[in-house]
Image (cartoon, rainbow, N blue to C red):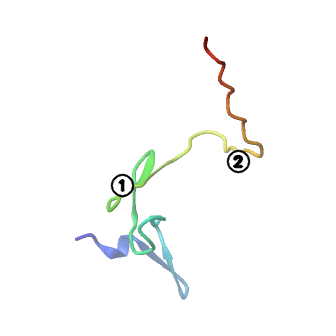
Amino acid sequence: MTDASKFYKIEGDKLIRTHRTCPKCGTSTFMGDHYDRWVCGKCGYTVFKRKGKKTTPRTRRRSPRKRSKST
């Protein structure tokens, strides 16, 4: 078993989670913190950490490529 005190921190009268929770499994499942990613041990959901400058989300989507007709 893991030590549950690693996953929580007490600040004043508030209890704060130190690790991410899995969006698929719910709030009771924590994600493992690796050097380049966070991984859920239950379902395998992975979130990769970004290095470098932060990017903003796209505001415009690309239109799909048009296929040329072959003869």
Q: Is residue 41 left or right of residue 53?
A: left
Which residue lies at the image location 67% right of the left edge and 28% below the top edge?
A: 65
Q: Which mark is residue 18?
A: none
Give the residue furthest to the top. Answer: 71
Residue 4, image x and y in percent? 33, 75
Q: Which residue type carries mark 2?
A: Pro
Give the camera-side residue of 71 and 1.
71
Q: Secondary structure at mark 2?
A: loop
Which comes sooner in the sequence, label 1 or label 2? 1
Find the residue positioned furthest to the left: 1
The answer for how far apart the CA atoms under marks 1 and 2 are is 25 Å
Residue that label 1 marks: 44
Residue at the far right: name it: 59
Residue in view at x 67 percent, y 45 percent: 54
Q: Position of residue 14 (x, y in %)?
A: 54, 84
Camera-side residue: 12 or 66?
Answer: 66
* Residue 33 rendering spot, x and y as whole percentages: 41, 56
**Relative to residue 42, is residue 9 depicted above or below?**
below
Crowding near pointer 1: few (<14 within 10 Å), some, many (20+)? few
Q: Nearer the viewer, residue 44 or 56?
A: 44
Q: Position of residue 58 (x, y in %)?
A: 72, 44
46 shown above or below 2: above
Query: What residue does disc 2 label?
Result: 57
Q: Amino acid at mark 1?
A: Gly
Question: Which residue shows up at 56% across the image and 44% down it?
Answer: 50
